[in-house]
Image: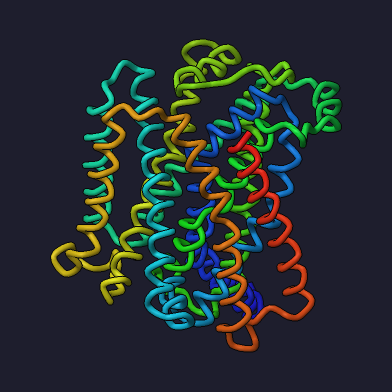
Amino acid sequence: MSEAGMLLQAATLRRLRHLLAAIGPGLVVMLADTETGSVIAAAQSGAHWGYRMLPLLLLLIPLLYMAQELTIRLALGTGKSYGELVRQRWGRRAELASAALLLTSCLGALATQLSGLAGVGQLFGIPVWHTIGLLCALIFIMVCTGSYRSVERIAIGLGVFELAFLAEAWLARPDPGQMLAQLTQLPLGNHDFLLLAAANIGTCIMPWTLCYQQSAMLDKGLTLADLKPARLDTLIGAILCQVITAGILIAAAAAFGNGAGGESLDTIPQIAGGFTLLLGPTGGKLLFALALSGGALVATIVVCLSSAWTLGELAGKRESLEKHPLEAPWFYGSFAAMLMVTGALVSSGVNLVKLSIATSVANALLLPVMLAGLYWLASRELPPPLKPGRGYRLLLAALFVLVAGFSLYSGLVGSLG
């Protein structure tokens, strides 16, 4: 090989290593986005309304990417987390209000994940408190004995199991004619349909996903040199997240949905039952358990880390997974407290489906506040090279107002109906 060829090969390898080193936070947060709440909202939508919610799930891809991409700019352009920027721009009270909003979202999300994992245990005859106790202990040990990069690799490995939902959608063999017919019949005046629409939006863009990615990029030590691969990381993750969610809806529609708006699912075993109808009692149950557990475990890690980072910032400390537990007791203590409190709540027998839908709708109602804060910070706090241009800001504003307004309307009308 010539000297020029060797130099070209070396440069290509350096770019590849740089790309692989920067990829992670966006993919992890998107795998976490396909969590228990998303599975329940999509499965309920497919069972209750067939394929009618499918356009909404796919239309959310660009919005999901654009919202998360702003967190990339803010992290790399300011070197600060979302909470730190809120305090810098609006003061301590605003930071406390933002943290309260985030922690409320995290608490509901974590309860949903642990409830989903407990439901998976019940499929195999394992008592709820056994499943919750073992999982909480294993997750805490994993976090205490690793670094950010090791936790990230584990999270991505767990998230791979979510691809089973795509296999289930393919094996469901949906009827193209029925799908096309239902896509033109959107019951936008139906309260139940609007409530599920709000739930699907609320499980797509959530306070904890926005805050996690910004803090994770700082914990990983990424810089402005990582901007392009970080954007690619997030774009791939956003597409994968919504395609997997669409797969869940398609599989549920094929298993349960007659499109008449009559089927409703109340438990994880009941949702899993639809997949056993498609794939048989053993294969269906196993694939569903792996897929749901993968997303729920990644989301559990992400939610707990978001909470711990937020609580640390409120105490005036930016903690990191790179520190030993004895060096960052507040960080690891907060992580453990979230697991213990929520684990106890789930073990008490809370209704998973009702909790999940309520949490998702609450996220949808909080979405306008989060998007407004994100937009304002990106417009005011970024240095000129990273600040969105005038045309892009107008596009962002239009999309954010449209989706936030629809989620607010859907959540309120659906809840009151």
Q: Is 207 above or below relative to 161?
A: below
**Quadrant of the rendered structure where residue 4 is?**
bottom right
Side (left or right) of 185 relative to 12: right
Question: Which residue is at the front of the view, 178 or 397?
Answer: 397
Quarter of the rendering occupied by the N terminus = bottom right
Residue displayed at 64% across by 59% down: 65
- Percent position (x, y) of residue 129? 23, 28
Colour option used: rainbow
In-front residue for pair 1/172: 172
Q: Residue at x 31, y 16 (%)?
A: 125
In this view, the residue farthest toward the front is 416
Q: Residue at x 52, y 43 (%)?
A: 360
Residue 54 percent across, percent down from the top left: 72, 36
Front-most of residues 34 and 347: 347
Which quadrant would residue 14 be assigned to in this image?
A: bottom right
Q: Residue furthest left?
A: 326
**Seen in the image, is 389 located left or right of residue 95?**
right
Image coordinates of residue 255 in percent, x first then y, are 64, 17
Rendering quarter of residue 180: top right
